[in-house]
Image: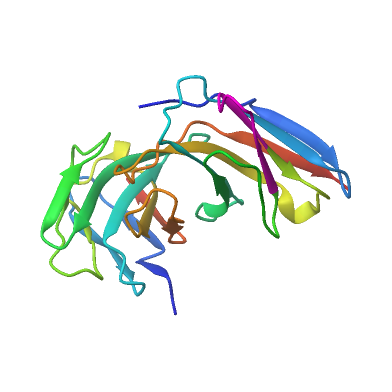
Amino acid sequence: NAGVTQTPKFQVLKTGQSMTLQCAQDMNHEYMSWYRQDPGMGLRLIHYSVGAGITDQGEVPNGYNVSRSTTEDFPLRLLSAAPSQTSVYFCASSHPPSGNTIYFGEGSWLTVV
Amino acid sequence: DAKTTQPNSMESNEEEPVHLPCNHSTISGTDYIHWYRQLPSQGPEYVIHGLTSNVNNRMASLAIAEDRKSSTLILHRATLRDAAVYYCILRDPPDYKLSFGAGTTVTVRA
């Protein structure tokens, strides 16, 4: 049982490049989400999904796209990377009831130069 | 969304208890109180959660005020590995999203 797996762990991009951060979970969780964390701050929600085929925007969605074609995978796409997107990105998953634990991946460190 | 208020930082000596307060005066009747912690360079990890009653697990205890407007996370015997940022978060069904504040940075002195 791997939990929530994120790849890559580290990435350096040039401004204007695009890339996809991968997230996969093997717990059959309906809910998945992406957060970003800037230095010294708490996590902020980018996008989330309540099930396959359903996605919605979080607090800071601009510059990012997501899709949810399967229960297991929830990739995050940066369309045209900007230095302001330099951050640590965390993927999370859980079952719906609010008393359930949310599981986080180990993070993806992204630097845009 | 109901918000929480936590102190920015707390210090403790190793082997001593740590009491981390959290105020949530606008909590609704269906909000669960969750605590997560984030060790350096890692993703957040679950610590404990509760609704109305005090809760205990192998990591910590959660004491919830009778009016539910505040709660306290208790680490019974702090170790160096407990040094982390601790987040108090309200989670309201059916909304599963988490709203993170800045959390409380816990420093443990050897």
Say left or right for B40 vs B108: left
Between B85 and B26, the one lying in front of the other is B26
Q: Start and end of the magenta stretch?
A: B61-72
> Could you tell me which residue is drawn at 26 percent across and 50 percent down?
A14
Q: How many marks?
A: 0
Say left or right for A55 vs B19: left
Specify how the rendered protein is coloured: rainbow
Where's the N terminus of chain B, which quadrant?
Answer: top left
Q: Does the magenta portion include B43?
A: no
Q: Residue A71 at what x, y percent from top left?
A: 22, 68
Say left or right for B40 vs A45: right
> Could you tell me which residue is drawn at 39 percent across and 41 percent down?
B98
Residue furthest bottom as drawn: A1
Q: Residue A49 at what x, y percent from top left?
A: 21, 53
B56 in relation to B108, above or below: below
Between A18 and A2, the one lying in front of the other is A2
Between A95 and B54, the one lying in front of the other is B54
Occupied quadrant, residue A7: bottom left
Residue B58 shows up from this direction: yes
Q: Residue B18 at what x, y percent from top left?
A: 78, 39
Q: Does the magenta portion include B67?
A: yes
Residue furthest top as drawn: B25
Say left or right for B32 vs A74: right
Q: Residue A79 at what x, y percent from top left?
A: 14, 49
Residue A64 shows up from this direction: no
Occupied quadrant, residue B100: top left
